[in-house]
Image: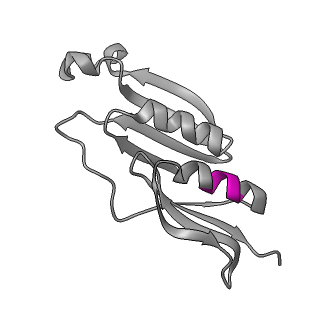
Amino acid sequence: MTACFGLSFDGNCEAAFELYARTLNGKLVYLLRWGDSPMAKDAPPEWAGKIFHARLTIGGIDLTGADTLPDKYEAPRGFSILIGIPDPDEVERAFHALAEGGTVTMPLQETFWAKRFGAVTDRYGLPWTINCEQAP
């Protein structure tokens, strides 16, 4: 069994996945545009360059994403993507990169369970929670 998270975007999937690849040391392993897909006829002509399906691998996790058709998109709610990063310096870097142009919902800080913990909704509307646990 594998775990994969599927994310929907409002026309900015490619930019979001490029940011996540840079920020979280991931690799964009697949990208299919609406215009090149068997579903091209179902999308408006201006959507041809948007992403029909993308897959980004970060460590052992896959994120998939797509630009949902304009009349079908719904903003994410009720979840966050929780990532654990063991290096406090990397946590700082990743948190601030995701926060740029977004909204910090909990500043990065030390907690009773973590060296660094914080939450942010990035510029693409996705909520992230970042954790750097205490050494045992």
Q: Position of residue 8 (x, y in %)?
A: 35, 43
Residue 6 belongs to the span the image colors magenta: no
* Residue 116 position (above or below residue 46): below
* Residue 82 position (above or below residue 58): below
Taking the spot 48% from the left edge, 38% from the top edge, the residue there is 16
Taking the spot 33% from the left edge, 60% from the top edge, the residue there is 77
* Residue 94 position (above or below residue 14): below
* Residue 59 position (above or below residue 117): above
Q: Is residue 85 left or right of residue 65?
A: right
Q: Is residue 39 visible?
A: no
Towards the viewer: 95 or 2: 95
Taking the spot 65% from the left edge, 73% from the top edge, the residue there is 109
Towards the viewer: 61 or 43: 43
Q: What span is in magenta?
A: 91-95
Q: Position of residue 87 (x, y in %)?
A: 78, 60
- The colouring scheme, among rainbow, by chain, secondary structure or one colour, is one colour
Towards the viewer: 66 or 23: 23
Q: Is residue 70 left or right of residue 106?
A: left
Q: Position of residue 123 (x, y in %)?
A: 43, 47
